[in-house]
Image (tube, rainbow, N blue to C red):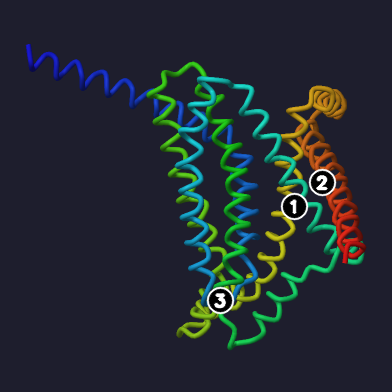
Amino acid sequence: MAGASLLTLLDDISVILDDVSVMTKLAAKKTAGVLGDDLALNAEQVSGVKANRELPVVWAVAKGSFINKLILVPAALLISAIYPPLITFLLMCGGLFLVYEGAEKVIHRFWPHALPHDEEQEARRKANADEKVDLVAFEKEKIKGAIRTDFILSAEIIVIALGATASATLLERSLVLSLLAVAITVGIYGLVAGIVKIDDVGLHMMEKDGAFTQKVGKVLFAAAPKLMKFLSIAGTLAMFLVGGGILVHGINFLHHGVEDIAHLTGIFESFTTALLNGVIGFIIGAIIVGLLTVIGKMRNKDESAAH
């Protein structure tokens, strides 16, 4: 009897693991688009630090990402069981934050005089140029920002995965989300670490013997700054695509309007949907930046008048 019970238990475990494997693959496919945005955005977020501090910064953000998912997975399961609409509301808040950050970056880049002077960015630039300055304090703010952004992207990935496992048991959903969370974090930040060290790899290869190795090293070394520039642009675009997509899906009239317009473009429907999500994301983000800038100026005037 004991042997039969053990075999039954093992068979049940085997069935559960098989179901979990299938659902994990399905969830991974559904989140593939967000994962691409996540990679570009996180690579851009941890760029701009000195070469000898790149890996420590990536590792610090990766640890923050693990903590994010440690919070998000049980929270998502709990909220989906108690009050599912709350997940949509929280995602909308995250979407607003993403488009706001993206719009602020774009406006600072192209219309710097439209916003207050970024003293923090100026201080970081001076610190990078001064060998005597300890950059750890400056990096902490950058790391915090990257972890905040990771939290929002991770939340969307987990919610999408949650939707893909809607018919599963609580145990199966928990296993799928946990496996996906670990795999995503290891994969994303492993790639980010590789991307930010491409120039070092290229420099190392250039110092080796062999004409072919040296040529490859030169290509990698020359490509590194261009790749980082591309990822910086892609990361900002990802803020609008992901944030705009969240907001569009959460606002019915926008969702239906985007669907109707995109449907008219036939084979370019997916591209049109992404483009419209991005444009709407930028517009909403710019409105938020404008409102916060006006409020900030009004507060400064009130403080000046009080003094």
Q: In the image, residue 54 lies at what x, y percent?
A: 54, 70
Which mark is in front, 3 or 2?
2
In front: label 1 or label 3: 1
Q: What kind of residue is marked 3?
A: Ala
- The residue that appears at 50% across and 20% down in the rendered structure is 81
**Which residue: 48% across, 57% down?**
190
Q: What secondary structure is found at the residue carrying circle 2?
A: helix
Which residue is under mark 3?
Answer: 51
Amino acid type shown at disc 2: Gly
Within 10 Å of disc 1 (Cα), the crowding (few <14, some 14-19, many 20+) is: many
Residue most toward the front? 307
Q: Earlier in the sequence, mark 1 or mark 3?
A: 3
Residue at the disc numbered 2 = 285
Name which quarter of the figure residue 259 lies in. Answer: top right
**Residue at mark 1:** 101
- Name the residue nearer the viewer: 31 or 129: 129
From the top left corner, tell me how far across and down residue 177 is, in percent. 46, 33
Q: Are marks 2 and 1 in contact (CB under 8 Å)?
A: yes
Q: Earlier in the sequence, mark 3 or mark 2?
A: 3
**Local secondary structure at mark 3:** helix
